[in-house]
């Protein structure tokens, strides 16, 4: 009986560790998928609502855990970023970083090299985008270095 | 046999009228619902992607058949309109009408009385919105008169 009790307690421990880990990372509701480590630093979750290549419209949201960010990248179309929850940023190459707080809206012009991320808070941004029918809608580039975030140009 | 042939042809006619009607109104793909006639003039279709009252984020798109429009209304939060396909407009009360073409972005401030619609083309707009947890996120008002659309103030 002792071994049964031991195994039972072991199971409960594993289950509770697992569920705690899930709460602190993957959002518990919605159809989120993990941002690939070749494209993001830290924990980033993406939820696609629609990817309509006929009407030419993508709608999604992205969640950055504190300190997480995307690689440098650019889109062939226009991207609208809406700060939903927490605090994050947009860094366009050659411009100072823009801190984004709940309710802020920013439009990124086609072809602009940029990175999205958060510093020390969790951050969720809503996204709308067009020109999504092409093969290379998003072109992924190098990871963003810490010092590049602070550059004023 | 004549009556059978007659009924058969009648069925084919009804089916083809029905399917033609569907093609010209309800979009064929997606989870669209018809905008209520108490809130819209003409054929308007709405597709909700997410209505998250916890993170405070709504994402949707709205399709206006030519000549369709919303009643005057206002939102308690901020609304971002992204012109996806076709041509339509935003009319804020007290301002000239703004024509919206593919790729245009407009931000409507909380509490601004406005109407969305199309004149003689089909128009699809993408929407993001916040402050959606309240009971009265959107306050619906009167229908918009034709002459009100032309007013410059």
Image (spheres, coloured by chain):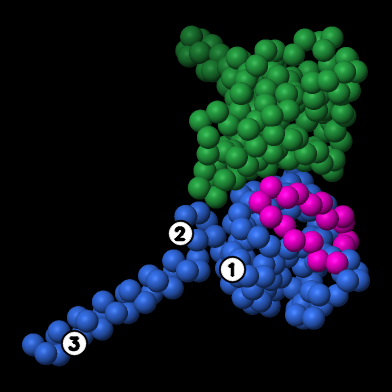
Chain colours: A green, B blue
Q: Name the residue carrying label 2.
A: B28
x then y, percent, for residue B152? 88, 71
- The Cα–Cα distance between marks 3 and 1, rounded to whole angstroms, is 35 Å
Q: Earlier in the sequence, mark 2 or mark 3?
A: 3
Above or below, B134 against A110 in this view is below
Q: Quadrant of the C terminus of chain B?
A: bottom right
Residue A124 in view: yes
Q: Name the residue carrying label 1.
A: B65
On whether disc 2 and disc 1 are found on a single subunit, the reply is: yes
Which element type, helix, strand or loop, lies under badge 1?
loop
- Magenta stretch containing residue B76, yes or no? no
x then y, percent, for residue A24? 70, 24
In the rendered image, which quarter is residue A58 located in? top right
- The Cα–Cα distance between marks 2 and 1, rounded to whole angstroms, is 14 Å
A41 vs A82, left or right, is left
x then y, percent, for residue A71? 69, 18
Q: Quadrant of the N terminus of chain B?
A: bottom left
| B144 and A9: which is toward the camera | B144
Q: Earlier in the sequence, mark 3 or mark 1?
A: 3
- Magenta stretch containing residue B111, yes or no? yes
**Callout 2 crowding tier (Cα within 10 Å): few <14, some 14–19, many ≥20:** few
Q: Name the residue carrying label 3.
A: B6
Q: Residue at x 57, y 38 (%)?
A: A132
Residue A65 in view: no
First to last magenta residue range: B96-113
């Amino acid at each position: 009986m002792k071994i049964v009790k031991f195994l039972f307690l072991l199971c409960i421990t594993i289950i509770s560790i697992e569920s705690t880990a899930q709460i602190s990372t993957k959002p518990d509701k919605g159809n989120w998928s993990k941002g690939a480590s070749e494209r993001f630093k830290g924990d980033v979750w993406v939820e696609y609502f629609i990817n309509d290549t006929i009407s030419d419209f993508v709608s999604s949201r992205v969640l950055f855990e504190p300190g997480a960010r995307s690689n440098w990248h650019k889109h062939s179309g226009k991207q609208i970023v809406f700060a939903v929850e927490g605090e994050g940023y947009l860094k366009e190459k050659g411009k100072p970083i823009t801190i984004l707080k709940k309710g802020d809206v920013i439009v990124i012009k086609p072809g602009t090299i940029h990175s999205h991320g958060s510093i020390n808070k969790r951050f969720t941004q809503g996204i709308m985008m067009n020109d999504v029918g092409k093969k290379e809608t998003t072109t992924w580039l190098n990871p963003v270095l810490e010092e590049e975030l602070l550059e004023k140009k």
